[in-house]
Image (cartoon, rainbow, N blue to C red):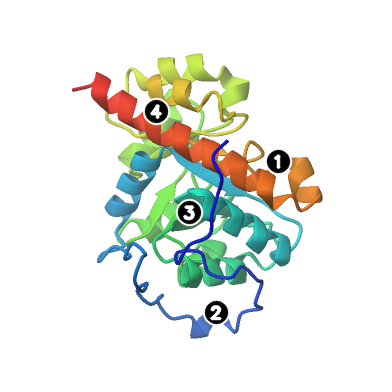
Amino acid sequence: MATVSNSLCSPPCRWRPATALARWSPPRPRTRGCSPPPSLSSAEHTLAQIENSGVIACLRASSPELAMEAACAALRAGISVLEIVVSTPSVFEVLQQLVRDYPAAVLGVGTVLNAKDAQIAISAGARFLMSPAMVKGILADTLASEVLYIPGVMTPTEILSAYDAGAKIVKVYPVSALGGISYISAIQKPFPHIPMVASQGVTIESTGEYIAHGASAVVLSEAIFNKEAMSRCNFDLISQLALKASLLGNEAVKQKRRCTR
């Protein structure tokens, strides 16, 4: 396993309780040695970054301190797209701090179920929002914004309904319970123009197969943020898993594009 090293792009990782969200300001550009943030944080640009990565790391934690440490471990290891589940304590303040510390990362909030939480997440700097189902209020509020909304879908009807309503990408959930790779392969065929994220029960090892069979990206939760590693604060293991996931995701995307040329 390759080692993970700190760099100028790896700020000190400590939970610093944030001030009021109303005082949030956009992150400053990075200094030397780090990739600058995009000039326009549009939904289309965010979608392209997700498709280029192939992996969305999904973090849920029992405390803001644990969330910060685990998120930093994953981001430093190469994860470029990260969602924090809304049930994480102080989730919006954690997001706020990560946006400041990692301005080039694509950061979002997951399991968002109502428009109020969506608006707070956007105010804290979320580039994307994800739900287990389509929440019409969130979709309506984000259609004209620069924030990407990824609604959850399960059936062909739900996929087409979300797309016709304006969704640029959908999350097939719970994909493992629906049949896994074979389900993605089958459900994507009539909708090749609709980007799909495979979510629930996806392993690092199966990432390539999901992408090869039609998924634009996969959501990896416990595959990266291993339960035992989180409970023992084993951030080295989280970094190793994140590095492996990032490399496999990038390679799967490259391979898929080579095959479709």
Mark 3 and mark 4 residues within 8 Å of each other at the beta carbon: no
Structural distance between the alpha carbons of marks 1 and 3: 23 Å
Q: Crowding at label 1, few (<14), some or many (≥20) Cα neighbours within 10 Å?
A: some
User: Eyeballing the image, is 244 above or below 59?
Assistant: above
Q: Earlier in the sequence, mark 3 or mark 4?
A: 3
Q: Earlier in the sequence, mark 1 or mark 4?
A: 1
Structural distance between the alpha carbons of marks 1 and 4: 22 Å
The residue at 71%/55% (across/down) is 61
Q: Crowding at label 4, few (<14), some or many (≥20) Cα neighbours within 10 Å?
A: many
- x and y percentages locating residue 236 in the rendered image: 67, 49
Disc marking residue 252: 4
Give whichever of 256, 20 is nearer the camera. 256
**Dot 1: what SS?**
loop
Q: Residue tagged by mark 3?
A: 129
Residue type at tag 1: Asn
Q: Crowding at label 3, few (<14), some or many (≥20) Cα neighbours within 10 Å?
A: many
**Dot 4: what SS?**
helix
Mark 3 and mark 2 residues within 8 Å of each other at the beta carbon: no
Do we see residue 113 in this rendering?
Answer: no
User: Eyeballing the image, is 168 above or below 137?
Assistant: above
The residue at 34%/38% (across/down) is 163
**Dot 3: what SS?**
strand
- x and y percentages locating residue 211 in the rendered image: 41, 26
Q: Residue tagged by mark 1?
A: 226
Give whichever of 136, 250 is nearer the camera. 250
Q: Residue tagged by mark 2?
A: 21
The residue at 53%/69% (across/down) is 11
